[in-house]
Amino acid sequence: MPEISIIVPVYKAEQYLPDCIDSILSQTFSDFEVILVDDGSPDNCLAICREYAARDSRVSVIHQENQGQAAARNHALSQARGQWVCFVDSDDLIHPQMVERLYHAAVDGGASISMCRMLEAAVPPGDFFHPCQGDYDTVGMDEATLVSLFDRDAYPGWVACAKLIRREIVKTHLFCLGRVYEDNEAVCHWLQEAGTVAQMSYPLYFYRSNPDSTTQKNFSLKRLDYLWALEQIIRFYTLIGYTQLRDRFCGLYAEAAAGCYSRVKYELNRPDVAREIEKSVWHLVRKRTVPLTKKQFETLLDAMHPKLIRLYWPAEAAVRTLREKGAAELARKAAEQLRKGDRK
């Protein structure tokens, strides 16, 4: 039985797939299986996968009709034999020592998840493959640590890649079918379930900035799944009482909702979908499912009701004056505005 299962969902990646698989098979740690899941890719990916499987007994291939990355990963998990799981995207590369380093960090550190940093670029720099000298530290997954991880990495801690995870933890919360950004939603559950995580400061995972990837190509309605993922994360951290971390993700949500609304309405010319986004956002805000700060509320109001925001500012200023300086000052300012109006 292999110690580790490395899972690679494959779709429209024939240009990069051989380099990806080669980087996996060149690992200094060799006790693993590679499960390549061809997700109905219309190019030459399936033939490439089968060629590697014929050459290396550690490689197996699953072929399925196109169902999305979540279904591909879940399918592979149902057949994985390793005690540990590692996810690699088919257009990315991993450092020759990544699996070895993550494995020893997890086992020696008594952690259920180990993770390294990611290097993002269009092409890997020449020194990416140099020997790794980085060490690791182990941390408990309490709220303060997660907030620190969020503030330091600005979100990559919540992706499936660049990690080694005990298989039973992954299977406690599988990927949501039919969604993109599905790993963002799943990983928050894994981190909490792990309890202890080993962290490496060295970048051992190369994330290719591929303009044709699902999350990088031109804006489409599938990108709205980012709002779904953020809503689920906010609900989860509210449920377990991590309000400081919840508020961090609320900030992301306000920015993302405002951006998605504008792009759907003006770039895609879909005012009907924009209205649905607006209804969903204000419903969550009213229910306090997504508790927003004043600044975050104003960001959404400005994006969705640009005319209303021009009425909001004077009203907000009046309320602030009344609260801070009393009714007399508010009356003085109102009279001053009226005099200015008379002079025009």
Image (cartoon, rainbow, N blue to C red):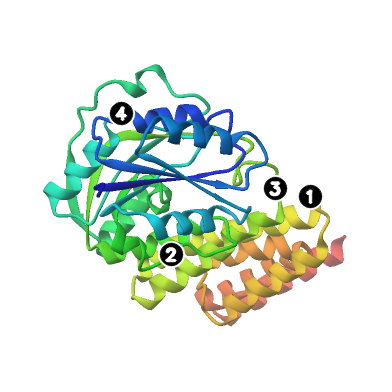
Residue under the image location 63 percent in, 53 percent down: 66
Task: Please identify, in this view, whether the residue under mark 2 or under mark 3 is nearer the observer.
Answer: 2
Question: Does the rendering let one see residue 154?
Answer: no
216 vs 234, nearest the viewer: 216
Mark 1 → mark 3, Cα distance in angstroms? 8 Å
- Residue 38 as seen in the image, left or right of residue 117: right
Q: What's under tag 2, amino acid-wise? A: Leu
Q: Is residue 86 above or below residue 93?
A: below
State which tag comes first along the sequence, 4 or 1.
4
Given this view, does label 4 or label 1 mark the residue nearer the observer? 4
Q: Nearer the viewer, mark 1 or mark 3?
A: 3
Report which residue position mark 1 lands on: 267
Nearer the camera: disc 4 or disc 3: 4
User: How far is mark 4 from mark 1, CA to CA?
Assistant: 42 Å
Q: Within 10 angstroms of label 3, few (less than 14), some, or many (20 or more) residues?
A: some
SS for callout 4: loop
* Disc 2 element: loop
Separation of residues labelled 2 and 4 (CA atoms): 28 Å
Tell me the number on the disc at residue 97: none
Q: Nearer the viewer, mark 1 or mark 2?
A: 2
Element under disc 3 = loop
Spatial CA span between label 2 and label 3? 26 Å
- Tell me which label, 1 or 2, sits earlier in the chain: 2
**Which residue sits furthest top?**
126
- As drawn, the label of residue 174 is 2
Which circle's residue, 4 or 3, is located before the other in the chain? Answer: 4
Residue position marked by numbered label 3 in the rendering: 219
**Amino acid type of disc 4?**
Pro
